[in-house]
Amino acid sequence: MIPAKDEQGRIGRVLTMLGGTLLDRIIVVVNGSRDGTLSEIQKLNMAQVEVILFDSVLGIDVPRAVGAYAAFKRGATSVVFVDGDMIGKIDEIVRRLIHAVIYQKADLAMTDCYPKMPFGNKLADRMLSYRKLLNEEMDIYDQIGVATPSHGPHVVSRRLMEDVDFKDFAVPPMILAYAVKHSFDIAVPVSTAQVHLGSKVKGYYHSKNIADTVIGHTIEALCFYRDQPRTRRYLCKDYQGYNPSRRFDILDVYMGRK
């Protein structure tokens, strides 16, 4: 599945790339777009593409939950997650992730986007320190490094989807924490530097909010793993980022919870 908000000029390249992989259906959750994202998708006329359209902006990661729920209801045996701005040559990455789930029976296959830790980028260093904290806590750091479903293409099996709360797909590290805590099989069959994903480069304000959002997600997952009440606060600091603007109310309606 692909979340897409204002991805004109990119979404067509992403879909064309994915069309050459083993995917039977590609669900694009177009939310709050005010550019030509939808028309660009429609002009491709790809039979395997399905659009789920929302006029409202759902907020970071909420479209993942929508797409995962929709794919599950349509009988998907596994779901691939790729961002709508990811125009790098990642088709081989996607193939290897799918192979890990289908043939090696992994329940969560992720991409390690930081095979080498960055130096001198304070936002990245801080975000990765929390990802490392979570993975060390779960005793998987030596196995997967700082890999997380928050970052890079990844694939989830139906077996895991049958067990997890779909709302947690909007808090990606929760899927990893749940998988580890409940003894599902995880794998990182591929690694690539972040720059090779081809994602948009945005300004400092956006990057800081993304970092705080992901850190908050990671703290929630850490609390869950420790059997503590979920919070986004750690060491006297609250990590919200874009979290307050995320539309869980729309997600609840979509999943029939309201």
Image: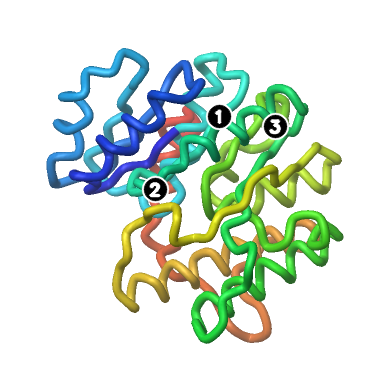
Q: Which mark is residue 79?
A: 1
Q: In the image shown, does 128 or 194 lie closer to the viewer?
A: 194
* Residue 182: percent from left, percent from top: 83, 41
Q: Give the residue drawn at x 39%, y 72%.
A: 207
- Mark 2 or 3 closer to N-term? 2
> Can you give x and y, in whole percent of width and height, for residue 130 in the image?
66, 72
138 left or right of 102? right
Question: Image quadrant of residue 93?
Answer: top right
The circle drawn on residue 88 is: 2
The residue under the point 47% across, 28% down is 256
Give how far apart the Cα atoms at labels 2 and 3 are.
21 Å
Residue flagged by tag 3: what amino acid is it? Ala
The amino acid type of the residue labelled 2 equals Gly
Residue named by callout 3: 100
In the depicted structure, whether residue 45 falls above or below residue 197: above
Up the image or down, 85 lies above or below 114; here it is above
Indicate whether 197 appears above or below 44.
Answer: below
Q: Which residue corresponds to the image point at 66% horizontal and 78% vertical from the top-left?
A: 234
| Mark sitting on residue 64 | none
Circle 3 — which element? helix
* Dots 2, 1 in contact, CB < 8 A: no
